[in-house]
Amino acid sequence: MSQIVYLNGQFLPIAEAKISVLDRGFIFGDGVYEVIPVYSRHPFRLAEHLRRLQASLESIRLPNPYPDTEWTTLITELIEKNATEDQSLYLHITRGVAPRDHAFPANTPVTVFMMSNPLITSTRAQCETGVAAISHADNRWGRCDIKAIALLPNVLLRQMAVDVGAVETVLFRDGFLTEGAASNIFAVKKGVLLAPPKDHHMLAGITYDLILELAEEHKIPVEVRKLTEARVRAADELWITSSTKEILPIIQLDGKPVGKGKPGEAFWQMYNLYQDYKQQVMRHASP
Ligand code: PDD
């Protein structure tokens, strides 16, 4: 089964999907995207992803090309046309094709692109070992809540981690934790789950919301508050969360152990809750 993608109303093999070099996504990074994990061919938290997509589109003043029902139909079809049971569905909308000019073009249809790749989540072995992270000043723009396709700062920040054999770069802005280069970050101190509040300096992760919901449901103490760099460095546990990584423990930050230097109790509790939730949702999801 070759990889089938969706482009502007058509499903076609990836090699045949072509866009103009004048697409504003290519020229300006003028667009937004979503990454939706798909388990056993069921898109996970689709309504929430579509809601965040709507918010991103509104923030960049782009009309949503489809109602949610249409998105659902297209996404379902794309999942069916691709081979693996678990997929990572990438959805991308740009301000379309127009002569290069920073200002918005008039009456230009948007470009809609979707592709699906096999979902590669964190492995159980990675969770048992834990991963290393580094930190850096958050030098991105002031609207990190928009899931914008213009990701150059995130690309550079994450590459810094990869260059030193780490998996993520933890970002601090004005002395406070924001998020990771491609993930949200949680801390745990004395059994309390600590999460930075949603604002313009971080992306409101769908996984972030789920972790907080699971914590509330299972009576895990939570504090959503701004976290100073010192608190993060003194945490017993640090976690990375995202749709593709799910939940992953950081055991080393900038070469120093986090807490006891191994995945903590709170991590395993949340890991199990997350895996159980996934199973439940899959069992009850409509076909
Ligand atoms: N990124 N913050 C940033 C900067 C991210 O890029 C992501 C996810 C998240 C977590 O959001 P969610 O839980 O909804 O996946 C937070 C995706 C996976 C990506 O760009 O590939």
Image: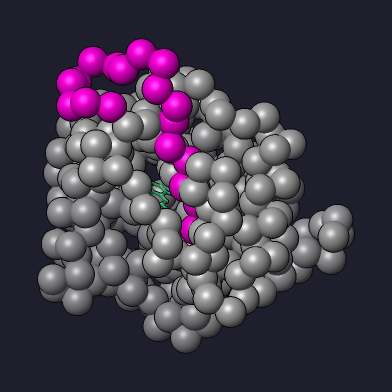
The answer to which of 79 and 221 lies nearer the viewer is 79
Residue 17 appears at what percent x and percent y? Answer: 42, 57
Q: In what quadrant of the picture does the C terminus appear?
A: bottom right
Q: In what quadrant of the picture does the N terminus appear?
A: bottom right
Looking at the image, residue 165 lies above or below residue 204? below
Q: Is residue 212 magenta?
A: no
Looking at the image, residue 165 lies above or below residue 59? below
Q: Is residue 110 magenta?
A: yes
Total tally of numbered discs in the picture: 0
The answer to which of 194 and 134 lies nearer the viewer is 134
Residue 47 visible in the picture: no
Q: Which residue appears at 65% of the width and 66% of the height?
A: 81
Q: Which residue appears at 15% of the width and 39% of the height?
A: 139
The answer to which of 240 and 188 lies nearer the viewer is 240
Q: How is the image coloured?
A: one colour
Residue 33's image quarter? top left
Residue 9 appears at what percent x and percent y? Answer: 57, 43
Q: Bounds of the magenta span?
A: 98-115
The answer to which of 35 and 111 lies nearer the viewer is 111
